[in-house]
Image (cartoon, rainbow, N blue to C red):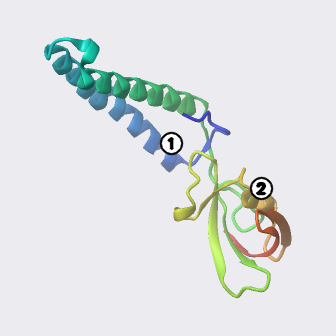
Amino acid sequence: MNEPHDSFLTQEKFEELKKELEHLKTVRRKEVAESLEYARSLGDISENAEYQEARDMQAAIEERIQYLEKVIKEAKIVAHANKGDVVGLGSAVTIEKQGDKESHTYTIVGSEEANIHDHKLSFLSPLGEALMGKAKGDSFTFETPGGKQTYSVLKVS
């Protein structure tokens, strides 16, 4: 598992991670323990694929539990306080690429929550970093794999 790059989470994501952690600790641990018990009952564990698979699953679950416990312990809950002023964590920002007439709206989040399909952009990503501190009407340029791109901030909320 990746180490958390930052520990900024929205309250919603924090609750989601706590719920996942609880499920892993209560339901999944029990399921894997039962799988291990069943696999052991099949006899010779040295050549037992079910046993090895259950052990691998147990290791993966324990690793995820440790990761989630660390993220939750170190989490800083963000609530966007300066709505409409400048782009920061929790901001919803609408931008337009220079020369395009199509705009895109993103929410700036911590890296644990980033998901481009949900228009959630990490503040550590190249675009997220370029947006931080910008205000409505600002133009900015940042480096992309295809070269420098210039965008304008249309709205911050």
Quarter of the figure with the N terminus:
top right
Quarter of the figure with the C terminus:
bottom right
Please tell me how crowded label 1 is: few (under 14), some (14-19), or many (20+) other residues with Cα within 10 Å.
many
Q: Where is residue 57 in the image (x, y as percent from the top left)?
A: 35, 28
Which residue bears the numbered disc 1?
Answer: 14
Name the image quarter holding residue 62.
top left
Q: Position of residue 58 (x, y in %)?
A: 35, 24
Which residue bears the numbered disc 2?
Answer: 129
Relative side of 122 to 22, left or right: right
Relative side of 116 to 22, left or right: right
Taking the spot 52% from the left edge, 30% from the top edge, the residue there is: 67
Mark 2 vs mark 1: which is more N-terminal?
1
Nearest the eye: 45 or 134 = 45
Q: Is mark 1 on a helix, strand or loop?
A: helix
Relative side of 118 to 47, left or right: right
Type of amino acid under label 1: Phe
**In front: label 2 or label 1:** 2
Taking the spot 58% from the left edge, 45% from the top edge, the residue there is: 112
